[in-house]
Amino acid sequence: MLTFQMTVAVVLWRLIGMNEAEIAESQQHDENPVGGLIVWLPANFVSTLFDQPLSGDEIVECEILGTKMTGLSQCTGSLVASVDGAQSVANIRCVLKGRIESENSGRNGPAKILSTTSTSFDAMKLVRFDGIRFTSSPVELCVATSLEITNIDTNLKGIKAVVVKRIASAQAVATKEEVRTIAEELTRKRLAEKIDGEFELQLSQANRAIKIVKSSLTYIGIREIRIVTRRIAQNVEVGIVVATSNRN
């Protein structure tokens, strides 16, 4: 569901791999008081690489209070990121907002129950980059689900059909709030697993790429890379500290 390219890793390590003359031509930079060079990037240069729309469909099957349900879930939303200032790490706050709409078909005995659910969600995922690797914390997630029963039917005929629909309708009304609560919790769990799983996959791929690039830099020279940040007026900037030394 959350397919995004971790191009921020490529950008940061491309800058690290540049020599000082190339950096001077392409980026604003300051001398680091402790030695080396600091390349300053606007925080939104980093964070906007995470921004993207969300869209995806999924078949969902579950059983709630004895009713086996199958639904087509459609998710839409957006992912927007921002960078928080910290001295030794870049904290990238990824905020996801969206809605999941689902049309469901359930069966309880001879009764067929059609319903719709609508879930709005607000999630926050914190990604940290310390110049060596990306890490993240578990997603913080808020969801709110509404449920509507759209139709109750049966394949039975005559008086049996009338009785079955009357009983099923009464049960649906009596258990509607309980069903909504269970459906909301199932959606929360499923959404959290998907968000954490997708971030874990993408970050692990970025970390593997960074490890390979860092290993290759040993052929150029021993380099120390650190992350610093600073705030100018209302804007945060991310600094990449590049310290080099010649190989013996």
Image: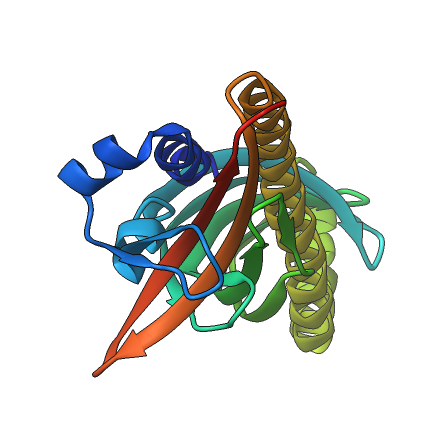
Q: Is residue 240 above or below residue 7?
A: below
The spot of residue 223 in percent (x, y) is: 55, 37
How are the colours assigned in the image? rainbow
Q: Residue at x 42, y 66 (%)?
A: 33
Where is residue 159 shown, x and y percent of the image?
A: 70, 50
Left of 216 or right of it: where is 193?
Answer: right
Viewer-proximal residue among 152 and 226: 226
Quadrant (top left, top right, bottom left, bottom right) of the C terminus: top right
Q: Quadrant of residue 157?
A: top right
* Residue found at the very far left of the displayed protein: 25
* Observer able to see residue 200: yes
Give above or below for 144 relative to 119: below
Instruction: Give the residue displayed 66% in from the left and 35% down from the top.
Output: 155
Q: Nearer the viewer, residue 191 or 102?
A: 191
Q: Is residue 92 in sight in this rendering? A: no
Residue 99 picture location, percent across and down: 42, 58
* Residue at 40%, 65% in the rendered image: 83
Q: Nearer the viewer, residue 172 or 123?
A: 123
Where in the figure is residue 146, as x and y percent of width and height? 52, 69
Of all residues shown, which one is farthest toward the right? 66
Query: Relative to residue 248, is residue 58 depicted above or below?
Result: below
